[in-house]
Amino acid sequence: MVEAKSPAAQLEAKIRERTATVGVVGLGYVGLPLLRAFFQAGFPVVGYDVDTQKIDMLKRGESYLKHLGEDFVGELSKSPKFLPTANPADLAKADAIILCVPTPLGKHGEPDMSYIEKSTEMVAKVLRKGQLVSLESTTYPGTTRGDCMPILAKTGLVAGKDYFLAFSPEREDPGRKDHSTQTIPKLVGGTDETSGKLATMLYAAAIKKVIPVDNAEVAEAAKLLENIYRCVNIALVNELKPVLGAMGIDIWKVIDAAATKPFGFQAFYPGPGLGGHCIPIDPFYLTWKAREFGHHTRFIELAGEINNSMPHYVIHKTIEGLNEVGKPLRGSKVLVIGLAYKPDVDDVRETPAAEIIKLLFEHGADVSYHDPHVPLFAGMRKYMEYRMHSVPLTRDNLKGADCVLIVTNHAAVDWKAIADHSNLVVDSRNALSKLLPIAGKYVQA
Ligand SMILES: NC(=O)c1ccc[n+]([C@@H]2O[C@H](COP(=O)([O-])OP(=O)(O)OC[C@H]3O[C@@H](n4cnc5c(N)ncnc54)[C@H](O)[C@@H]3O)[C@@H](O)[C@H]2O)c1
């Protein structure tokens, strides 16, 4: 494939022999499962994170991501093929460095590129001939070539000749049981042909199906398209929810009916608003970049507006439900079920539950919450003043609440107890539909 003994040929041989050391930068929801995929494929791995608590836990064989299980981290920590580190110099040992750092939005909704910039600067300090650098963080098209490459170019090394640079979007869905990092098809795009080929080869050694695309920009834009598609379609059903509700039609039944069509329709479900590190954020990376080219992303902004309004709709339905039993929201005891942004995970990033709790407090409600996966609600970016502990889901707590408000439908919640002992249930997830009619009053939100 490439000239013998060139940096590319040397890296190619190491990948083939699985002696290439793979360094993963940022060991969060994306980085740690990815490191596991390369480790399980037989590669030596270096795991780097600025968070020393995470590194210490990995050294002790303890997992901070419950869904990955302790077994894997225990095995990893005992292996001589694993180096957990908070020392950037250790990345010099890596033949391939994969960046999985956060890409949040800044204060004014603009992309916060500081994590990508800082980690690329750190890679530049150890960059040497024959290394491959792959960015996995979700970002706007042009980041790998336009933001990372200039930082790496300051070393004097040339991409595509001395070192190799690619983008491969992460499609991880934490908590999903039917797919793992290894089975989710992986897109790979290089900033040049050789980089694309080497990155494809590396990923193909650990992941079942790898799809090379023309370049890094196609891979970057494809990831955004996937998430924008979800964001816009969720907004569509969120818009229809109050409309059909006003007509006395159950939107969940409508979606299930439409989903019987074998083509041309994919089911999306309404909810209390968007959460997680991806769908509420990534589309706005494109919105921001589009402005540079004189374009406006009206669909994305409208979807954002509708999705962001959903916590207010849930509050409105709560007020209506309480009103029907002769109570004002002010002073009422509201027990929120579920703080995580989606079922069966402990991830609270951007969770709509936080906004809903804030709005409930602002309306003078007496608020508590129950989440089997999130024992403490504290220290969240926009909600620093809140510090609450999950209360147990006892009969007394349910009976004592004026309203039980369902925000997240975790499998581990005792739904039967909620159905049997609540005075009023406001359900934003259709969680109780199979248990209807319930003992108390039921309101879909
Ligand atoms: N979580 C998901 O489901 C998901 C899915 C697909 C894509 N993504 C994308 O993947 C990227 C990472 O997301 P995540 O969910 O893993 O985030 P995360 O917050 O779980 O993990 C990021 C890790 O990076 C570390 N970090 C921060 N700055 C660093 C630096 N300079 N050097 C080294 N480590 C650093 C943090 O300590 C943290 O451990 C984001 O761009 C995100 O949009 C996430």
Image: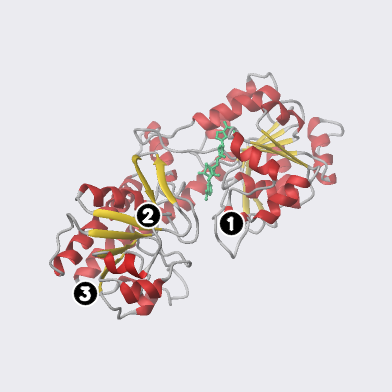
Residues at marks 1 and 2, CA–CA distance in whole angstroms? 28 Å
**Residue type at tag 3:** Gly
**Residue type at tag 2:** Val
Where's the C terminus, which quadrant?
bottom left
> In the image, residue 378 lies at what x, y percent?
40, 43
Q: Residue at x 12, y 67 (%)?
A: 326
Please give the residue where the numbered disc 3 appears in the rendered image. Answer: 248
Please give left or right for residue 366 compared with residue 63 in the image. Answer: left
Indicate the secondary structure of the residue bearing disc 2: helix
Mark 1 beta carbon near ligand 1 (under 8 Å): no
Residue sitting nearer the eye, 427 or 216? 427
Please give the residue where the numbered disc 1 appears in the rendered image. Answer: 67
Q: Residue at x 35, y 52 (%)?
A: 352
Please give the residue where the numbered disc 2 appears in the rendered image. Answer: 232
Q: Residue at x 57, y 45 (%)?
A: 219
Q: Select label 2 or label 3 by which is in front.
A: 3
Residue sitting nearer the eye, 310 or 258? 310
Residues at marks 1 and 3, CA–CA distance in whole angstroms? 39 Å
Indicate the secondary structure of the residue bearing disc 3: loop
**Relative to 222, does residue 56 appear above or below in the rendering?**
above
